[in-house]
């Protein structure tokens, strides 16, 4: 159930990103909402179920966006493992610290994939632009907190806990690693 | 203190009162008869009566008006909320209608342009709408609501009323992906309309394109029209591409550096036409380039 619901949520985010948030075909300010889902799954859920969701979504995204098949699976999986690693290694499990890490992860993963692709298919890519990518990373961070709360709400509903938004963040008494 | 009995009117006084009363009534009757049956003149007595009754009437009229006005205001106040709600709804309806009218007008203009283009081009075309846009910053393509079932095939040219938009590069039964002309991977044969010199137009990823392989000896200036060359059979000859917006003559090199502003406004792209021409495109050559437009 978790996999199906979060796949549908991801699908909704991707559709929104390719339609509502794309004001025109050359618009560069659409938020990469899919990356927030990648981050959420990396921070809060196990690898197997997360990878099933992310693989299916990335394949779909590959069809809807881009020219190079396999680019989005690379972005999704690299992003997932980077954030998973960081969340495991970070001394603090507090979402206020985890949210900026999503922006850092977004920039790093996109830069890595761009570098690889610029060797493989240099003529297909728009030149790398740091200002544009910083704006995109900023948008990801901006949307991260409300979307995390939304995902957490859905997760609680799936678990049969109807307490809703009041316990949006997973917190224990100890802010440091338990 | 007087005795009660002393206050009783005497018989004499009573008779006097009776006489006075009868006299008064007779006088009134006389006045009535004279005024009714006489010359109907509005005399001083009438004027006096009118003057006497006027202020009282005025007072009552004002009071009555004030009460009526108060009542009316109260009733109005009761109905003002309903009126407000009704008027708000009417205003909203009018605004929606106005918005729809404006939208219909814009759509009409856009479609008329497309229709004009379709009629003048005299080529088999299928109309399509953009349903999705590539959100990545590295590529520029769109998804349209026409596919193989509508006769759309890979490599077909996509235009709108202003000129060339791009080329179909992937097709499914009902949908297709179109690579925009401004994408870096897009390249097409073009002509400078005036000098008929041929060059290759490449996308930059922004809102302009780059025209390559135009020699320095060619006379070219800003504002010159660029059109499709028609080589390769993908685009018909003479379709508008854009205008030269900047020409740079570098000291080194054989070629000019030319920037072209597309005729199509990519920020307002909505309705498109796919030119349904029979194309023969090899599936894949050695380096895989033929897979891409």
Image: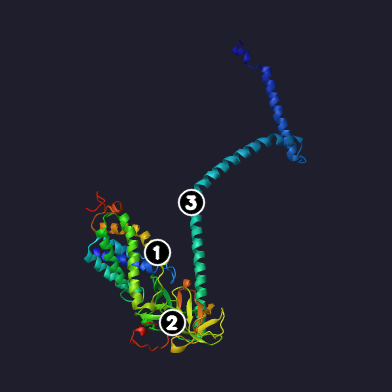
Residue B169 is marked as none
Q: Name the residue under label 3.
A: B82
- In the rendered view, would you say A54 is above or below B155? above
Expressed as whole percent of the image width and height from the top left, the position of residue B20 reads 70, 25
Q: Few, some or many C-alpha atoms within 10 Å of disc 1 (few <14, some 14-19, many ≥20)?
A: some
- In the rendered view, would you say B51 is above or below B117? above
Q: What colour scheme governs how the chains and residues are painted in the rendered image of this protein? A: rainbow
For image coordinates 51% across by 55% down, the residue present is: B87
Closest to the observer: B30 or B257?
B257
Which one is in front in this view, the residue at disc 3 or the one at disc 2?
2
Expressed as whole percent of the image width and height from the top left, the position of residue A140 reads 36, 62
For image coordinates 69% across by 30% down, the residue present is: B25
For image coordinates 48% across by 75% down, the residue present is: B208
> Tag 2 or tag 3, which sits nearer the N-term?
3
Closest to the observer: B139 or A54?
B139
Residue at far top of view: B1
Report helix, strand or loop for mark 1: helix
**Left or right of A171 on screen, residue A146:** right
Q: Are marks 1 and 3 on the same chain?
A: no
- Residue B3 position by quadrant: top right
Task: Specify the subunit that label 1 lies on.
Answer: A
Residue B187 is marked as 2
Q: Mark 1 points at which residue?
A: A134
**Left or right of B171 on screen, residue B244:** right
Q: Few, some or many C-alpha atoms within 10 Å of disc 2 (few <14, some 14-19, many ≥20)?
A: some
- Residue B245 position by quadrant: bottom right
Report helix, strand or loop for mark 3: helix
């Amino acid at each position: 159930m978790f996999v199906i619901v979060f796949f549908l949520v991801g699908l909704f985010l991707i559709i929104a990103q390719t339609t509502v948030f794309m004001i025109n075909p050359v618009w560069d300010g659409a938020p990469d909402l899919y990356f927030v889902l990648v981050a959420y799954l990396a921070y809060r859920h196990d690898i197997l179920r997360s990878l099933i969701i992310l693989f299916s979504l990335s394949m779909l995204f590959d069809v809807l966006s881009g020219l190079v098949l396999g680019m989005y699976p690379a972005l999704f999986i690299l992003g997932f493992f980077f954030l998973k690693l960081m969340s495991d290694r970070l001394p603090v499990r507090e979402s206020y610290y985890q949210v900026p890490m999503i922006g850092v992860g977004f920039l790093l993963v996109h830069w890595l994939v761009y570098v690889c692709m610029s060797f493989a298919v240099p003529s297909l890519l728009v030149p790398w632009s740091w200002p544009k990518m910083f704006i995109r990373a900023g948008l990801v961070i901006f949307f991260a907190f409300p979307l995390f709360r939304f995902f957490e709400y859905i997760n609680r509903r799936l678990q049969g806990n109807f307490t809703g938004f009041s316990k949006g963040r997973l917190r224990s008494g100890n802010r440091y690693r338990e | 203190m007087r005795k009660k009995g002393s206050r009783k009117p005497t018989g004499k006084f009573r008779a006097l009162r009776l006489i006075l009363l009868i006299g008064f009534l007779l006088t009134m009757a006389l006045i009535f008869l004279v005024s009714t049956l006489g010359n109907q003149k509005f005399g001083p007595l009438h004027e006096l009566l009118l003057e006497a009754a006027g202020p009282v009437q005025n007072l009552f009229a004002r009071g009555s008006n004030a009460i009526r006005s108060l009542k009316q205001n109260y009733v109005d106040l009761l109905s003002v909320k309903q009126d407000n709600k009704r008027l708000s709804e009417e205003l909203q309806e009018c605004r929606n209608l106005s918005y729809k009218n404006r939208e219909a007008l814009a759509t009409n203009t856009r479609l008329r342009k497309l229709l004009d283009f379709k009629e003048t081009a005299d080529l088999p075309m299928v109309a399509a709408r953009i349903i999705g846009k590539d959100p990545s910053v590295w590529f520029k393509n769109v998804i349209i609501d026409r596919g193989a079932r509508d006769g759309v095939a890979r490599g077909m040219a996509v235009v709108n009323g202003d000129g060339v938009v791009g080329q179909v590069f992937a097709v499914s039964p009902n949908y297709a992906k179109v690579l925009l002309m401004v994408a870096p991977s897009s390249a097409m044969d073009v002509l400078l309309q005036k000098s008929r010199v041929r060059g290759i137009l490449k996308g930059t990823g922004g809102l302009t394109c780059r025209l390559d392989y135009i020699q320095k000896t060619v006379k070219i200036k800003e504002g010159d029209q660029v059109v499709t060359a028609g080589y390769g059979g993908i685009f018909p000859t003479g379709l508008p591409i854009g205008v030269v917006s900047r020409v740079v003559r570098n000291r080194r090199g054989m070629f000019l550096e030319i920037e072209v502003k597309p005729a199509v406004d990519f920020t307002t792209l909505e309705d498109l036409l796919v030119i349904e021409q029979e194309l023969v495109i090899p599936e894949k050559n050695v380096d895989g380039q033929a897979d891409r437009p």
